Amino acid sequence: MENDMNAAGRSRTGPRQSDLHRPDLREPDTRRPDLREPDTRRPDLREPDTRRPDLREPEARHPDLRQPEARHPDPGHPDPGQPEGCQHDPRRTEFSWPDAREPDPLDETWQSVDLFFSDQPEPGAPAAVPGTSPARPAGPTPLSYGQGPRPSPAADGPAARTGSVPALGAPFHSGPKPPLYAPEPRELPSVREDPTAALTPDMVVDGAGYGPLTVRAASVRGDSHRYQGEPRQDSLAVVRLGTLGPDGLLLLAVADGVGSAARSHVGSQEACRLAAMELDAVSAELAETLRTGDRPGFAALVDTAVGRVATLLAHRAREHGDDPAAYATTLRALLVPLDPRVRARGFLAVGDGGTALLRAGEWNLSLTDPEHDGDGMIDTRTAALPHGHRARALLLAPALPGDVLVLCTDGLSTPLAGDAGMRDFLGSGWGRGAAPAPADFLWQLQYRVKSYDDDRTAVVLWEAGP
């Protein structure tokens, strides 16, 4: 193939040897085109005479923005001074770096922007007069919760926040050392093993306020369940039943899934949901029994509603192919009239838990369970839904202004009865008249006591003080 190409005569890849002596056919030197000596033999390749007025750089109106004029040769006529392959491409944009010695024309703009943001007045402060510096109050700026002092602009940079955000930190504990478990969420259940368990939050916080009534509620997964990657088995409900009129009620409920039951976390959630629906169906009748103090009528209505909750809970288990015993859970609830003139509070319970009253700084831990002496001992024998379908029901003594009523699972009632440090701590936090903020309430509820690592749930009702 090589011999055929040489025999074909004139090569397509280069000129003939005889053509190399012709000046107009010599190949251009492409080694450094920008350093190539101009060809003085070609008039059209001579360097332009800058003395000619038609080639002088025009005077810019703004010297700071002046740039050298770029030559744009006609795309149809290549520049003869450029070798082939280095001709100007009209699609390419000419670019040259700005002269660092020249001032940036936007310097004043950026300085004015920085000055504008650094000198913004505080909300509510009088507007500054243009051309003058804004007035600043004398003395330190007062601080609010969670907010540090207002930053002042630095001389050579943006303003930096100097204050720190308050943090509650780890929950307090009884004794010289905290429990060994970490006081924060740990291992989580797997979605593949049990989607319902995986989607149960480690902790929840809730609340409500109606006139003189303030409610705070929280549920926290116990240390042992966190360590073992098991779901929180407690549940709670803060629900309004009926209407906002004189027949309106607040339902405050807690449910404690039995630890040995495989699906008790589902049972506790369903017990709260079903209880809200069944009690709402008879909310007007319940409100009337509380208004008139009809304890037998209240007990009959509650017993019927709880019986239906048990039946529906067992049905739900069978629908999913589960043994109803796997959904075993306790249930404890308060019914509070929204009518401020009605001071009676209705109580119902299936299984264990706690109901305490904090009045004038003193605890009453056997408000609804007089058979318990409040020694803090854990009793694993308890009635539970759905097999236990009979409820204990009673009307509590009229609430007084300033009372704090606590409804809780045994994760709180047991250490509260057995540890004086917890009683003092919660008595100080909850007995000052005003209800704490929801986040503060959640932190206070997590007060730690060794050997008590179960789920902890409480719904607390504050009666407005006089």
Image: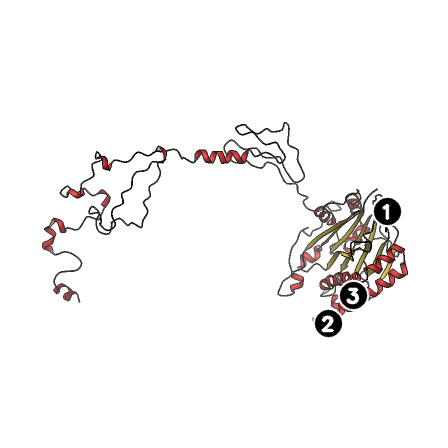
Q: Are the residues flagged by discs 3 and 1 in contact, CB closer than 8 Å? A: no
Q: Is residue 125 left or right of residue 51?
A: right
Q: Quadrant location of residue 301?
A: bottom right
Residue to which mark 1 is pinned: 400
Give the percent coordinates (x, y) of residue 373: 87, 54
Q: Residue at x 11, y 55 (%)?
A: 17
Whichever of labels 2 and 1 marks the residue nearer the N terminus, that label is 2
Mark 3 residue element = helix
Of labels 2 and 1, the one closer to you:
1
Q: Is residue 322 above or below residue 439?
A: below
Give the percent coordinates (x, y) of residue 46: 18, 41
Tell me the quadrant of the picture where the N terminus can be found: bottom left
Q: Is residue 195 above or below residue 168?
A: below
Q: Is residue 383 above or below residue 102?
A: below
The crowd level at tag 3 (other Cα within 10 Å; few <14, some 14-19, many 20+) is: many
Of labels 2 and 3, the one closer to you:
3
What amino acid type should be assigned to the residue bearing mark 1? Leu
Q: How is the image coloured?
A: secondary structure
Residue to which mark 2 is pinned: 318
Q: Is residue 191 left or right of residue 425?
A: left
What amino acid type should be assigned to the residue bearing mark 2? Arg
The crowd level at tag 2 (other Cα within 10 Å; few <14, some 14-19, many 20+) is: few
Give the Cα distance between marks 2 and 3: 14 Å
Whichever of labels 3 and 1 marks the residue nearer the N terminus, that label is 3
